[in-house]
Amino acid sequence: MSKVQRFEDLTIFQMARDLCKDVYAITKDGEFHKDMRFVQQIHAAAGSIMDNIAEGYERDGNKEFINFLYIAKGSCGEVRSQIIRATDEGFIDKDTAQKLYNDSLNLSKAISKFITSLKGSSITGLKHLKPES
């Protein structure tokens, strides 16, 4: 496992980025793109996952990072709910919906595992490390 030096190195960020790209892709065509309010909602929720992982990481402290990860996890649930609504409205087919749903659920689980590892870590964040003399 390579050392994480920036939020882009985090597996959960990479998973969130892939999910966000997939969400944007499904909203470009068909009936989905005609419901601009719904498109904006699902874009915001998917983007929020990435953004909260990034912002929390940049805070340099585990306590704040964990708070932002919980927000990101909540946004995963929001995306799953919106995928269900999009399927119910006929905006996306069931196979695509199932893939996105599973990807979002797996991301949520990965965020939970990451939170658990941060809570158990003896390192409380970069801002708490003493500078080298």
Image: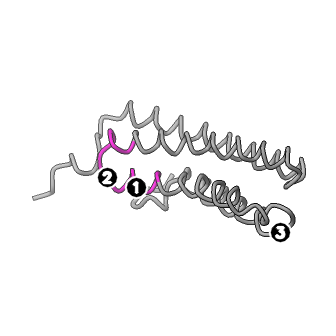
- Amino acid type at circle 2 is Arg
Question: In the figure, is residue 57 to the left or right of 36?
Answer: left
- Amino acid type at circle 1 is Glu
Give the residue pinned by disc 1: 55
- Amino acid type at circle 3 is Asp
Q: Nearer the viewer, residue 73 or 121?
A: 73
Question: In the figure, is residue 43 to the left or right of 3?
Answer: right
Neighbor class of circle 1 (other Cα within 10 Å; few <14, some 14-19, many 20+) is some
Q: Position of residue 42 (x, y in %)?
A: 66, 54
Residue drawn where x is 49% and y is 59% of the image: 9
- Colour logic: one colour
Q: Does the segment drawn in magenta span residue 61?
A: yes
Residue drawn where x is 15% and y is 55% of the image: 131
Q: Picture quarter containing residue 106?
A: top right
Helix, strand or loop under label 3: loop
Q: Position of residue 93 (x, y in %)?
A: 90, 52
Q: Does the segment drawn in magenta span residue 33?
A: no
Q: Label 1 to label 2, Cα distance in Å? A: 6 Å
Q: Is residue 109 above or below residue 53?
A: above
Helix, strand or loop under label 2: loop
Q: Is disc 3 in contact with disc 2, using a CB cutoff of under 8 Å? A: no
Q: Which residues are magenta?
A: 52-65
Q: Picture quarter containing residue 30?
A: bottom right
Q: Label 3 to label 1, Cα distance in Å? A: 31 Å
Give the residue pinned by disc 3: 29
Give the residue pinned by disc 2: 59
Closer to viewer: mark 3 or mark 1: 3
Residue drawn where x is 76% and y is 61% of the image: 35
